[in-house]
Image (tube, coloured by chain):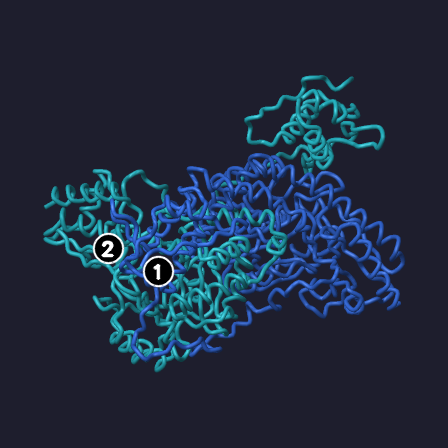
Chain colours: A blue, B cyan
Amino acid sequence: MQFPKGLITIDKNSQVPVYLQIANGIISHIRQGVLKPSIALPSSRLLAADLKVHRKTVVAAYDELYAQSWVDVYPRKGIFVAKNLPDVSPRKITTGMQPYAYPEKAFFEVPDDKTYISGPFLKKPEHNLEFNDGFPDIRLAPVELLVREYRRFATYHFTSKYLMYGPEQGSENLRTELARFFGETRGLQVKPENILITKGVQMALYLIAKTLLTKNDTVIAGDPGYNCPNEVFEQAGAKLALVPVDEHGINVSEIEAICKKKKVKLVYVIPHHHSPTTVTLSADRRMQLLELARKYKFAIVEDDYDYDFHYASSPILPLASVDHYGSVIYVGSFSKTIAPGIRIGFMIAPQNLITQATRFRRLIDRQGEQLLEEAMANLLKNGDIGRHLKKANKTYHERRDLLCRLLKEKLDGYISFKIPDGGFAVWVEYLNGLKPQEVAAKAATMGLTISNGTDYFHDPAHPNDGIRMGFASLNLKEMEQAVEILARAVKALS
Amino acid sequence: MQFPKGLITIDKNSQVPVYLQIANGIISHIRQGVLKPSIALPSSRLLAADLKVHRKTVVAAYDELYAQSWVDVYPRKGIFVAKNLPDVSPRKITTGMQPYAYPEKAFFEVPDDKTYISGPFLKKPEHNLEFNDGFPDIRLAPVELLVREYRRFATYHFTSKYLMYGPEQGSENLRTELARFFGETRGLQVKPENILITKGVQMALYLIAKTLLTKNDTVIAGDPGYNCPNEVFEQAGAKLALVPVDEHGINVSEIEAICKKKKVKLVYVIPHHHSPTTVTLSADRRMQLLELARKYKFAIVEDDYDYDFHYASSPILPLASVDHYGSVIYVGSFSKTIAPGIRIGFMIAPQNLITQATRFRRLIDRQGEQLLEEAMANLLKNGDIGRHLKKANKTYHERRDLLCRLLKEKLDGYISFKIPDGGFAVWVEYLNGLKPQEVAAKAATMGLTISNGTDYFHDPAHPNDGIRMGFASLNLKEMEQAVEILARAVKALS
């Protein structure tokens, strides 16, 4: 039998390269038995003429077939469908035995550990308008910058070294660039050795908890506060001691009162824009807190998740920048700078803790994504991150002002709020006995998703009139619609 | 003052886009005080003529300056250097207070937990030739395929949804493609719900240990064996019970003997190409092991890290494919398929364990890299992974044969080995009292890095004459040189 003319068709509009279309066409005919073992394929010149493509394209297709073992090549004779065709179908252990589908439940016992079960998994996004918890606008994410860096990896001669196992502590280039960036933006004097690259703030908190805490250790956190770290500390066996947060930040006198009664291992604070209330920890409380850390030898975990977004005046330097003794562990991420789905976070701490945390990290997942880390290092180095931050700050500044103006116009008398200095959300308190849960339920029926206020205090039953309204991910038109719906919901309930 | 001519220079060979060069040039002159606040910039038409660029390029530069707040725009008047220049320099907490560098040691106590300290961190690569533990050849990694997928992200309209928080269990597309891939290649009947995407096998093992094990639980592993899982199980508090591995795989009768004496929680096996010895678990032992799991209700962790690389005949189906009851947890990764630095692994298990492991994973790092997971899903879907595997199998098959031929030619009488059916390494045993440590030390002085044989048994002092010789990452020339050096080293010691 001869290789029939017109057997292969090419779609010039397809995204699949032409050489691969040719190779795939031939493979498909071999698979279907049209082209049988040992049949000669036409010379590349002949097939090229037949298909009206360049001869090199057919050569590439034949190379592909050879690489995949579909053809045999005999010098001076030609190319033939392989005598022994590649066969990837797996062998059965015992003939007659059928594979079984996985059962619902394991046959062994799976412990139902409640300490790490809180709340449902991420829900699919609704198509409502939404005042979220304070996320950046994904539509503004500089994904094209990231992709540009990835494109370079295809050609850079050094890419291959980033494909092998890499440093457990994270890319040296990225840690070097971060040390410089933190120096310029935060007055933070760190060396690359003080930095551990993590997957988001979450992993930094997990590693801190696992390396520092043992069962029944006391950890102090603010209430209202951010729930994720509390979960991590509790799963590590710690007991939480909650301290109120007022308009000057976490109550430092109450921290001292607890220290006088028992050994405190760790204090978790968000001094810059506290979540959920957006308050900034006052300068005198900052100094008191550092002094307490010295006196009682506890670790301060400073979560500075949105330092780079500040609209009112220059941001206040982190605690970590003025810590004389080595009491502060500084954590943050690029979730707000790039996007929450791009998982680059960091933990800055004295060298001996970084070493322990790095060893623990190796147990969990060995290392981070080197290509992503190298891409981030480049973006920091060539100034792209700085430029993006300027643009994004401008946009979010405008959106903050717009939300605050609209709230004033449409909801005056129903709510109270302070304009936040930075970040991604306004903390709004309902007046006149309006309940966040009722407003949220009403607004949901009108096409607006908004917080029902239940996630802020450790005790879900704690009285609370406040909610976070994220403004960053709504543009002008969406924001006007969203406030309009909220105003209608609130007025319907009043 | 007027905007001076010739102030901006453009480098057409630079990688920085021209519009950004113009913008950066103007910013630099503003920063240096050459262009003072309120100075008018020339019209885009004039500046374009001056710089011999298209007017749109200057418009883009001005847009950039405006976005970064360096200029004010007054309709019908023009563009001026901003009156209030952006200022990002951070404010000090207290005047006169200087930032301090991080001290070496934390002021708080950092526990020195030995359970997760074993072995040094990754060393910088030496420039020796190397028989490694069995890694793929990074030079063959299909990084261009991955980059191609990333390029698409820059344009795909749906990319943005992968930039937000995503599913904790991993990309639904990837889990769907994996379910299909495992069905086709392994006869494994799983649904996407049975799959959890992890960062390599390492994270799968960590999650299994954390969700299933409590203090003093008994875990069985083979000896010699792979050290990483043992570390993870021990850190979770388990006690290891070691069972010998012979030419038919792990000794299942010894597993039964232990089960008769105490409750066994988990048995870790590498049935396909056991690490380090490359032996395959025999069919009868497989059936016995599954039967024991049913009888004693332990979990089997089946690590199938190199299933896709098989040269001798069709690979044997995994235990997971013939497990009737739900006793087998199947783990693997694409470290060998793409590259060790590309961190995509998986864990396949009954639904109730997957749910618990997913909840725990959320505590650690919330989720994986969605863009990477989507890229992998596409590569599986469009057949690129299958094509790459065929090519890679062919290359590694040739390299295995080459190494075995060279060992036979150059080292006959000094070593013994069996040709492995698949995988990336040959298990070689020295004869005549040659010691792996002495050979490794000698070879190192001659430019060859090779295992010293100390990492295979749980007790480093256990007598051992064997080493793993990874053949996959050496090409023809390198392999010949490497065996040549080894032969000289061995003969010098004999």
> Residue lying furthest bottom in this view?
B295
Neighbour class for label 2 at 10 Å: few (<14), some, many (≥20)?
many
Residue at image point 57% right, 34% down: A382
Residue at image point 43% right, 73% down: B189
Identify the chain of the residue marked 2, using the numbered disc in the image. B
Residue at image point 87% right, 57% down: A411
Left or right of B460? Residue A127 is right
Q: Which mark is residue A35?
A: 1
Tell me whether marks 1 and 2 sit on the same chain: no
Residue at image point 46% right, 67% down: B179
Amino acid under label 2?
Val
**In the rendered image of this protein, does residue B39 appear above or below residue B142?**
above
Residue A423 position, x and y percent, is 71, 48
Q: Quadrant of the N terminus of chain A?
A: bottom left
Instruction: Out of B151 and B133, give the one closest to the viewer.
Output: B151
Amino acid under label 1?
Leu
Give SS at disc 1.
Answer: loop
Residue B403 position, x and y percent, is 22, 50
Instruction: Out of A378 and B18, give the one closest to the viewer.
Output: B18
Instruction: Out of A46 and A237, give the one closest to the viewer.
Output: A46
Give SS at disc 2.
Answer: strand
Q: Nearer the viewer, mark 1 or mark 2?
A: 1
**In the rendered image of this protein, does residue B222 appear above or below residue B402?**
below
Left or right of B117? Residue A318 is right
Using the rendered view, name the quadrant where residue A94 is placed.
Answer: bottom left
Q: Which residue is mark 2?
A: B426
Residue B448 position, x and y percent, is 24, 41
